[in-house]
Amino acid sequence: MCLTNKALLTFFDRRREKRLSFVNIREPDYSPSKHGGVSYADAMRHFHVIDGDHVAEGSEAILTAYTKVGLGWLMGVLRFPLIRWLVDGLYAVISRHRYTSERASNPRSDLTPPEC
């Protein structure tokens, strides 16, 4: 799911001045202090968006990222309370099972669950 979101966000960001940049948390020089204090373990658990000093995570990060690439009108609808409740629940389920679904959709994926 992470790779799918990255591909979709890159697609929607293609014609605009690049509003998003992605960080490879598996790089040896990854430093939480340079990325909003997001640790490797936390980054593996949730999607994050760092916007200045604000760090959004989970479903709020997804909504923020898609808003940044020009889909704010749709994300506004998804923020209505009842719909947002469903979005949060769906995100929780997808986030919990993302490694299984990623391997099923892309057997060559190098995503592996973080060690506990």
Image (cartoon, rainbow, N blue to C red):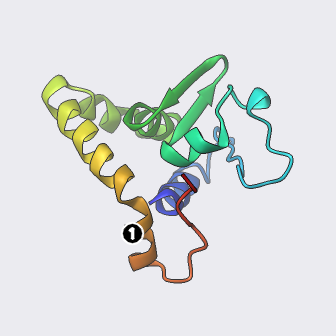
Between 107 and 67, the one lying in front of the other is 107
Q: Measured from the top left, where is residue 110 in percent x and y? A: 61, 73
Is 31 placed above or below 26 here?
A: above
Residue lying at 50% horizontally and 38% vertically, measured from the top left: 65
Report the residue that reaches farthest toward the left. Answer: 82
Q: Measured from the top left, where is residue 51 in percent x and y? A: 62, 25
Q: Tell whether 80 sits left or right of 109.
A: left
In the rendered structure, which amino acid carries the disc numbered 1?
A: Thr
Is 33 placed above or below 16 here?
A: above
Q: Measured from the top left, where is residue 63 in percent x and y? A: 40, 35
Between 48 and 44, the one lying in front of the other is 44
The quadrant of the rendering that contains the N terminus is: bottom left
Is 115 placed above or below 48 here?
A: below
As helix, strand or loop, the secondary structure at mark 1 comes to helix
Residue lying at 52% horizontally and 61% vertically, measured from the top left: 113
Report the residue that reaches farthest toward the bottom. Answer: 107
Residue lying at 38% horizontally and 50% vertically, measured from the top left: 95
Which of the 4 image quarters holds residue 31? top right
Q: Tell whether 65 sits left or right of 16.
A: left
